[in-house]
Image (tube, grey):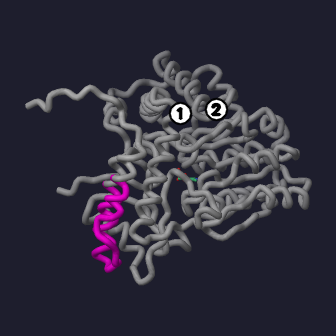
């Protein structure tokens, strides 16, 4: 037997309590019991997004919500600016082009970000821009974009500011209303600790105004219809009932811990990973400090002369630890250690020990055990340890 650990940047590990909750006999969705779940979830999601507006839950993967952020707010030919420095930024541009929008792609190299000043310049050159679409945490490269400052720049214009927060919301600081984000998107299988199949989206009053004149076709992802149904504590279509129930439990766990603590935990885990991998000579992929790394995943450059594709494969098949390789043009060049959602101190050691075993087998020269040692030292010195009354060691 090989004990398995899911440590990818999505889907992420699901706590056993949540799996147990989801395995109960199925309930019907047009019932008072389910309506209560719907309204509790909606209230709790507002606390995660930090918004006064409704947060809608769609039965789809995250990309469905990304698509809805275009179809519900734009018309054919509308000009949008997409910040694109990774696979998910590119996806926004692809969706825009699929719906015949005039997409201006502000591109930067993978591993880099796009600064607020560049967005400001692009908006000046394109005063007819209807929306600015960006990633917050670009999962494919490990980069966090400076959402707070980009929001300030976009806020001065008529354009709406749309963020894909699929690995950011619930893992990193986020204040939808205070920062002035018009549309925010999150996804179940990342920081929300449940299996894939739900996406979350909230939109501001400024975006609601745009929606009134938006003419792109939509049917399943009709957010106005979904919002009307939410007001009646239900959903437009048959939802993924089981996932709504799992989400209810997950959100209670998150809010019980407190969103500030959830975010602090992710920040500490991420900092520990960065220090540990660098302690054995590995290089982070985004060039810190030029770029801010995301706290959801640590992207690491594959050392020269090592067959990069083999690192995640060995970790998974020999040691039971699933992480992620590079996507698209990053394939074989980076590997990505996931740490979001149900993640804590011990996950760091689990991932690092398997990474070291794989690297050793592939011929990388380093002081064996040092990244694990570095992480343990970090945990000892920096992690808050709950003050518990120790019981007898018991038998
Ligand atoms: C995972 C992810 C998505 C895609 O979501 P799906 O659920 O696969 O559709 C989009 N954006 C980011 C940043 C992601 O990490």
Residue interval drawn in magenta = 350-376
Magenta region includes residue 353: yes
The earlier-in-sequence mark between 1 and 2 is: 2
Q: Nearer the viewer, residue 96 or 372?
A: 372
Q: Nearer the viewer, residue 106 or 303?
A: 303
At 30% from the left edge and 28% from the top edge, which residue is drawn? 388
Q: Residue 332: x percent and y percent?
A: 46, 75
Q: Quadrant of the N terminus?
A: bottom left
Residue 244's place in the image compared with 371, above or below, is above
Residue 281's place in the image compared with 9, above or below, is below
Q: Are marks 1 and 2 in contact (CB under 8 Å)?
A: yes
At 38% from the left edge and 53% from the top edge, which residue is drawn? 7
Q: Which residue is mark 2?
A: 50
Q: Which residue is mark 1?
A: 259
Q: Quadrant of the C terminus?
A: top left
- List the single residue furthest toward the bottom: 305
Q: Residue 338: x percent and y percent?
A: 44, 55
Q: Is residue 156 left or right of residue 199?
A: right
Residue 10's place in the image compared with 265, above or below, is below
At 41% from the left edge and 73% from the top edge, which residue is drawn? 309
At 70% from the left edge and 68% from the top edge, which residue is drawn? 108
How packed is label 2: few (under 14 Cα within 10 Å), some, or many (20 or more)? some
- List the single residue furthest toward the left: 395
Q: Is residue 131 left or right of residue 33?
A: right
Q: Is residue 198 visible?
A: no
Magenta span: chief secondary structure: helix
In the image, which is nearer the foreground, mark 1 or mark 2?
1
Q: Nearer the viewer, residue 307 or 195?
A: 307
Q: Is residue 113 left or right of residue 331?
A: right
How packed is label 1: few (under 14 Cα within 10 Å), some, or many (20 or more)? many
- List the single residue furthest toward the front: 381
């Amino acid at each position: 037997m090989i004990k398995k650990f899911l440590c990818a940047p999505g889907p992420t590990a699901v706590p056993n309590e949540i799996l147990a909750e989801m395995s109960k006999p199925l309930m019907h969705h047009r019932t008072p019991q389910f309506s209560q779940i719907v309204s509790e979830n909606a209230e709790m999601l507002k606390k995660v997004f930090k918004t006064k507006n409704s947060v809608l839950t769609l039965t789809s993967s995250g990309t469905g919500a990304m698509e809805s952020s275009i179809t519900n707010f734009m018309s054919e030919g509308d000009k949008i600016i997409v910040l694109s420095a990774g696979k998910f930024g590119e996806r926004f541009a692809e969706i825009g082009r699929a719906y015949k929008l005039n997409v201006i792609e502000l591109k930067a190299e993978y591993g880099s970000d796009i600064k607020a000043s560049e967005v400001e310049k692009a908006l000046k050159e394109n005063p007819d821009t209807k929306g600015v679409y960006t990633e917050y945490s670009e999962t494919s490269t490990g980069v966090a974009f400076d959402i707070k400052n980009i929001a300030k720049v976009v806020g001065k214009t008529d354009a709406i500011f749309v963020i894909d927060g699929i690995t950011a919301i619930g893992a990193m600081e986020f204040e939808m209303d205070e920062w002035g984000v018009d549309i925010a998107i999150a996804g179940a299988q990342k920081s929300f600790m449940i299996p894939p199949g739900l996406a979350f989206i909230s939109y501001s009053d400024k975006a609601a105004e745009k929606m009134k004149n938006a003419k792109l076709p939509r049917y399943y992802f009709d957010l106005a219809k979904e919002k009307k149904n939410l007001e009646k504590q239900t959903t437009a279509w048959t939802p993924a009932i089981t996932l709504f129930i799992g989400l209810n439990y997950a959100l209670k766990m998150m809010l019980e811990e407190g969103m500030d603590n959830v975010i602090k935990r992710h920040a500490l885990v991420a900092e520990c990973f960065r220090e540990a991998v660098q302690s054995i000579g590995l290089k982070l992929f985004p060039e810190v400090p030029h770029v801010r790394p995301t706290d959801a995943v640590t992207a690491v450059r594959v050392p020269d002369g090592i067959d990069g594709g083999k690192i995640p494969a060995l970790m998974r098949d020999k040691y039971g630890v699933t992480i992620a390789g590079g996507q698209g043009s990053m394939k074989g060049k980076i590997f990505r250690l996931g740490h979001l959602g149900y993640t804590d101190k011990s996950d760091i050691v689990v991932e690092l020990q398997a990474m070291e075993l794989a690297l050793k087998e592939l011929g990388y020269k380093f002081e064996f055990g040092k990244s694990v040692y570095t992480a343990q030292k970090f945990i000892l010195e920096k992690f808050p340890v709950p003050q518990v009354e120790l019981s007898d060691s018991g038998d």
